[in-house]
Amino acid sequence: MPRKKRDYISSISGWSVGNSERARKDAEAIQRVVRGARLPITNNIERSYIPEASIADTVAKYFSEPKFSDFSTDRECPIQIGPISYITDIVLLDSEGSFLAIVECKSLRNSNRGTQQLKSFLCATDTPYGILATSTNRDSWKFYENLRHNKFQEIDRATFEKQILG
């Protein structure tokens, strides 16, 4: 590939993170540069470039439903793991301010990293539940119960709600 085309493609990477419309335009631009090479514009890019902020807004809306009225939420809540400080995306707090659930919001392409990050947060804070949200569709979220000692059980949303709302 000529140097000019390679440099242009390199300059595109990173621009479209978290922006599906920009990702679509970038993919179309890359197609023009490589003269019609097929790239998965609609199927993969739209799903993998859902902005994490949109996912977090959907989770916050979920926790603002009347059934969660006895709880509060905190966005971008700092936690300490050893000497390093991290920021969780959303935390569901009980009436005493204790962590009840930690939510990690990730774009679909970062979901593997998000699972490990969520489990680390759950262990470090001894939080009973976690949610990995990779979409604005609640049915695709993964719910985890922290069984302690670095063991987790994936549960469905109905079980999560039943255990939280008791």
Image (spheres, rainbow, N blue to C red):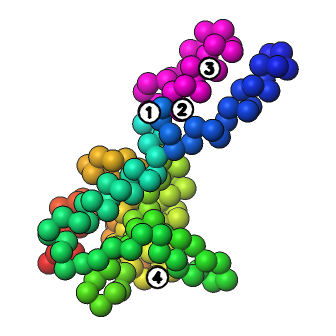
Disc 3 designates what residue?
29
Query: Which sits earlier in the primary sequence, circle 2 or circle 4?
Result: 2
Residues 116 and 48: in front is: 48
The alpha-carbon separation of the residues under discs 1 and 3 comes to 16 Å
Q: Residue at x 63, y 13 (%)?
A: 32
| 4 or 3: mark nearer the eye | 3
Report x, y in % for residue 71.
24, 78
Query: Which sits earlier in the primary sequence, circle 1 or circle 4?
Result: 1
The alpha-carbon separation of the residues under discs 2 and 1 comes to 8 Å
Query: Which sits earlier in the primary sequence, circle 3 or circle 2?
Result: 2
Residue that sits furthest to the top in the current view: 35
Q: Residue at x 46, y 46 (%)?
A: 51
The alpha-carbon separation of the residues under discs 4 and 3 comes to 45 Å
The alpha-carbon separation of the residues under discs 3 and 2 comes to 10 Å
The part of the chain drawn in magenta is 22-46
Disc 2 designates what residue?
23
Q: Amino acid at mark 4?
A: Thr
| 1 or 3: mark nearer the eye | 3
Query: Which sits earlier in the primary sequence, circle 4 or circle 3?
Result: 3
The alpha-carbon separation of the residues under discs 1 and 4 comes to 34 Å
CB under 8 Å between discs 2 and 1: yes
Residues 112 and 83: in front is: 83
- Asked if residue 25 is among those painted magenta in the image, a careful observer would answer yes
Disc 1 designates what residue?
46
Image quarter in which the C terminus is found? bottom left
Query: Which sits earlier in the primary sequence, circle 1 or circle 3?
Result: 3
* Disc on res. 125: 4
Task: Examine the rendered structure and indicate whether residue 106 appears above or below residue 27.
Answer: below
Q: Secondary structure at mark 4?
A: helix
**Quadrant in the picture for residue 70:** bottom left
Task: Examine the rendered structure and indicate whether residue 65 appears above or below residue 106.
Answer: below
Label 4 crowd (10 A; few <14 / some 14-19 / many >=20):
some
